[in-house]
């Protein structure tokens, strides 16, 4: 379970599964590290990848690990949550742009299975518009700028200003920031009140120095 | 001295002619396989050694080279052959059907690979298709596929739950089960990292991949571009999109297929929601695309879709579990869709 007063570093793994194993065993052990099984990894290897990553991380950390399954649910919320639950994930993601019925159902079922629900706000201009329509709030809201967006359109900014607004409006909600990859981005996100920073690029491009990188980023996120 | 020189010339002549004939034969046999660089190296070394021996004043050295020139070139050639064979073994055939060698450049890594691209069975403009979505598990899928009637108007969709459960292996397995040449749609619902997703689905043997209409424009653009590169049909799924035409207008290229989709959860929890059939003609008036309808599973809805000029009708509910009348149902749906 996530703690209110801690700041977390979420590392998304997207490399081939053999590399991921080595990367996880090279990670430093910290309770502030969240392991995310990336969307491409699930698409390529199925939920088996979640099971594997979980067992690797738990044998490395020697305690229960927090694993995020980035399923990006768009429909059939119940089926997908059952899948993630059977694989042993601790949190599941759903798209903010999914039909409202799906999101509502998703959050309800997540509570039922005692999983943390993450609402991924990729390509959403006004997160409040969606949040106000929901019956129940998700546990984590992820403000996300996609990889393709980042590469092809450098103008669009991550909505850092929304973090404070969301946290003021709702209690007991975590805000995650995804899409900023540099130390500067991380510092900005933390300064603006983010609880979780999601990173993937540096870690997946330089797997050999993953330990050093993790220490660097963990130091910034305090 | 004179005698010595004459002998030397004889030595030069005889092995060179033999070697030249051998080289020629080898080149005639393997010419299509050779790369230019290797040819240059191969010819260059033999020519260089010959010239060296011809103009060399050191008789002993020239003799040595001339004696070994044949062996030397053979060794070089063996290395070259090994190199070629290794490259061929690396390439795994994707489809046993008609194959052609196409050179593909992958942008992120900037390396070139030789990949075998199979010629996809194209969707025809004047035909109506029935797309059967498989969503439960692979055993069920195999049972359903075996009981389907044979028709080129049936497309097999590997559903999102299957892809999320088994990964690309789901597509690969289903590809191995179905009759050769069957059109396979991988419903991967791409939202980001279009490049990786399309590549993975292509490698698994899909003929078409889906992308979400609510995804960022950059992702959809990239998705369509990648699909073109891999010779796949691109499908954009307009689930939860109010105005599909607006999204299509913002794109650089138009996809091959637009899916008008009412989600399973939507259907279940708000019964009053209708599939917007009127959008079919709206889209068709503005763009030259095929339109697919997903989310309606009753005969009435299928009739409505076909009446409104949909090209593809997607059904899943009746094909979730295989029953005795799966064959009949498929035949009945096919009859409706004309």
Image (cartoon, coloured by chain):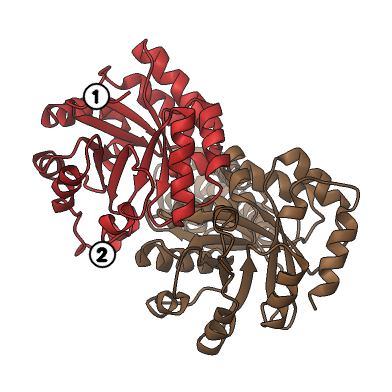
Mark 1 or mark 2: name the one nearer the start of the chain.
Answer: 1
B291, A220: nearer the viewer = B291
Judging from the image, mark 1 belongs to the subunit labelled A
Residue under numbered circle 2: A153
Q: Residue at x 38, y 15 (%)?
A: A64
Which chain can be seen in brown? B
Quarter of the rendering containing residue A24: top left
Q: Residue at x 26, y 19 (%)?
A: A31
Q: Is residue A193 left or right of residue A201?
A: left
Q: Residue at x 90, y 53 (%)?
A: B325
Quarter of the rendering containing residue A110: top left
Indicate the position of residue B305 as horizontal and vertical percent values.
Answer: 68, 75
B3, A109: nearer the viewer = A109
Q: Is residue A40 left or right of residue B153?
A: left
Q: Are marks 1 and 2 in contact (CB under 8 Å)?
A: no
Estimate the spatial distance between the alpha carbons at disc 1 and disc 2, rounded to whole Å.
35 Å
Indicate the position of residue A95 as horizontal and vertical percent values.
Answer: 41, 51
What is the quadrant of the C terminus of chain B in the image? bottom right
Indicate the position of residue A1 as horizontal and vertical percent values.
Answer: 33, 23
Q: Is residue A194 above or below residue B102?
A: above
* Secondary structure type for disc 1: loop
Q: Colour of chain A?
A: red
Q: Is residue A74 above or below residue B289?
A: above
Judging from the image, mark 2 belongs to the subunit labelled A
Indicate the position of residue B7 as horizontal and vertical percent values.
Answer: 57, 47
Question: For residue A3, which numbered disc appears in the image?
Answer: 1
Q: How many numbered markers are drawn?
A: 2
Toward the left, the furthest residue is: A191
Q: Residues within 10 Å of mark 1 (few under 14, many from 20)?
A: few
């Amino acid at each position: 379970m996530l703690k209110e007063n801690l700041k977390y570093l979420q590392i998304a793994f997207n490399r081939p599964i053999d590399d991921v194993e080595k990367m996880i065993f090279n990670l430093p052990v910290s309770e502030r590290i969240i392991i995310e099984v990336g969307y491409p990894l699930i698409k390529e290897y199925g939920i088996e990848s979640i099971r594997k990553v979980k067992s690797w991380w738990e044998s490395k950390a020697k305690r229960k690990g927090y694993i995020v399954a980035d399923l990006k649910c768009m429909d059939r919320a119940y089926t997908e949550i059952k899948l993630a639950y059977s694989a042993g994930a601790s949190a599941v993601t759903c798209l903010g742009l999914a039909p409202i019925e799906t999101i509502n159902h998703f959050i309800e079922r997540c509570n039922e299975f005692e999983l943390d629900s993450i609402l991924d706000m990729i390509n959403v201009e006004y997160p409040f518009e969606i949040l106000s329509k929901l019956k129940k709030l998700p546990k984590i809201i992820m403000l996300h700028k996609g990889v393709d967006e980042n590469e092809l359109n450098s103008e669009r900014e991550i909505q850092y200003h929304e973090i404070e607004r969301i946290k003021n409006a709702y209690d007991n909600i975590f805000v995650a920031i995804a899409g900023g990859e540099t130390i500067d981005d991380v510092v900005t996100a933390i300064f603006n009140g983010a609880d979780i920073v999601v990173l993937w690029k540096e870690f997946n491009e330089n797997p050999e120095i993953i330990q050093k990188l993790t220490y660097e980023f963990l130091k910034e996120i305090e | 001295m004179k005698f010595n020189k004459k002998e030397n010339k004889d030595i030069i002549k005889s092995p060179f002619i033999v070697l030249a004939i051998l080289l020629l034969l080898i080149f005639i046999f393997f010419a299509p396989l050779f790369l230019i660089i290797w040819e240059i190296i191969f010819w260059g070394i033999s020519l260089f050694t010959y010239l060296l021996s011809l103009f060399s004043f050191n008789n002993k050295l020239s003799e040595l080279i001339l004696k070994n020139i044949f062996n030397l070139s053979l060794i070089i050639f063996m290395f070259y052959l090994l190199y070629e064979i290794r490259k061929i073994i690396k390439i795994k055939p994707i489809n046993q059907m008609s194959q052609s060698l196409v050179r593909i450049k992958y942008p992120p890594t900037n390396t070139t690979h030789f990949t075998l691209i199979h010629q996809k069975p194209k969707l025809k403009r004047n035909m109506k298709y029935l797309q059967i979505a498989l969503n439960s598990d692979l055993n069920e899928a195999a049972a359903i596929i075996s009981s389907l009637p044979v028709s080129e108007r049936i497309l097999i969709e590997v559903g999102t739950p299957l892809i999320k459960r088994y990964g690309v292996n789901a597509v690969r397995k289903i590809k191995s089960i179905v009759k050769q040449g069957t059109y396979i749609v991988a419903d991967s619902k791409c939202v980001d990292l279009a490049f990786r997703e399309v590549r993975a689905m292509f490698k698994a043997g899909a003929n078409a991949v889906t992308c979400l209409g609510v995804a960022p424009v950059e992702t959809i653009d990239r998705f369509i571009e990648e699909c073109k590169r891999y010779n796949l049909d691109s499908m954009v799924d307009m689930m939860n999109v109010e105005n599909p035409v607006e999204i299509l207008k913002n794109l650089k290229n138009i996809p091959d297929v637009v899916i008008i989709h009412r989600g399973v959860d939507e259907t279940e929890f708000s019964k009053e929601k209708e599939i917007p059939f009127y959008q079919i003609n709206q889209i068709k008036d503005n763009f030259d695309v095929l339109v697919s309808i997903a989310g309606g599973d009753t005969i009435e809805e299928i009739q409505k879709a076909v009446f409104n000029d949909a090209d593809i009708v997607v059904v899943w509910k009746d094909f979730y579990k295989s029953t005795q009348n799966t064959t009949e149902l498929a035949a009945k749906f096919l009859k409706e869709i004309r």
